[in-house]
Image: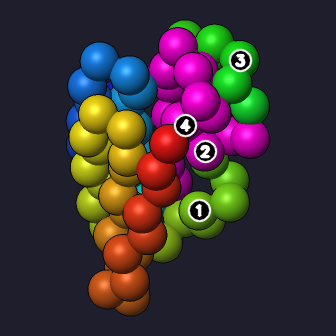
Amino acid sequence: CSDDALVVGEAQHSLVIKTTGAVVAFSGGGHGRIGLGSTSEQLSQVEVTALGIDNALVAVGFDHSLVLKTTGVVLSFVR
């Protein structure tokens, strides 16, 4: 999408930070990896509204995700 600022991914899931600071996710859904409270397959981008729009960077690993907030706080999500 034209408003994607950073796209990161690996085999299990991907995160996108938008130019607005919002984070969206998509995944096969196993283990609820994408922060949406569901293990359902999600192949199109869905906003992770719980993260708000004050996000600066995102990173993903095999079974975890990291979000750097604009305040400097780092959030970590694991399987």
> What amino acid does circle 4 point to?
Ile
Whether tag 1 and tag 2 are in contact, CB under 8 A, the answer is yes
Q: Is residue 31 above or below residue 44?
A: below
Pick whichever of labels 2 and 3 is earlier in the sequence. 2
Q: Earlier in the sequence, mark 1 or mark 2?
A: 2
User: Where does the magenta region start and end?
Assistant: 22-37
Mark 3, residues whose alpha carbon is within 10 Å: few (<14), some, or many (≥20)?
some
Residue 66: quadrant of the picture:
bottom left
Is 62 within the magenta?
no
- Numbered tag placed on residue 51 in the rendering: 1
Which residue is rendered at x = 60% and y = 45% of the image? 35
Q: Pointer 4: what residue?
A: 34
- Cα separation between marks 1 and 3: 20 Å
Residue 75 in view in this figure = yes
Q: Nearer the viewer, residue 59 or 62?
A: 62
Front residue of 76/50: it is 76
Residue extending farthest to the bottom is 71
At 55% across and 37% down in the image, what residue appears?
34
Within 10 Å of disc 1 (Cα), the crowding (few <14, some 14-19, many 20+) is some
Residue 61: x %, y % from top left? 26, 40
> Could you tell whether 26 is left or right of 18 in the image?
right
Residue 40 is marked as 3
The residue under label 2 is which amino acid type?
Gly
Query: Does the CB distance between marks 2 and 4 fall below 8 Å?
Result: yes
Distance, label 1 to label 2, CA atoms, is 9 Å
Q: CA distance from mark 4 to mark 1?
A: 12 Å
**Res. 74 image quadrant:** bottom left
Pointer 2: what residue?
35
Using a 10 Å C-alpha cutoff, classify the residue at mark 2 as few (fewer than 14 neighbours), some (14 to 19) or many (20 or more): many
- What residue type is disc 3 on? Ser
**Element marked by disc 2:** loop
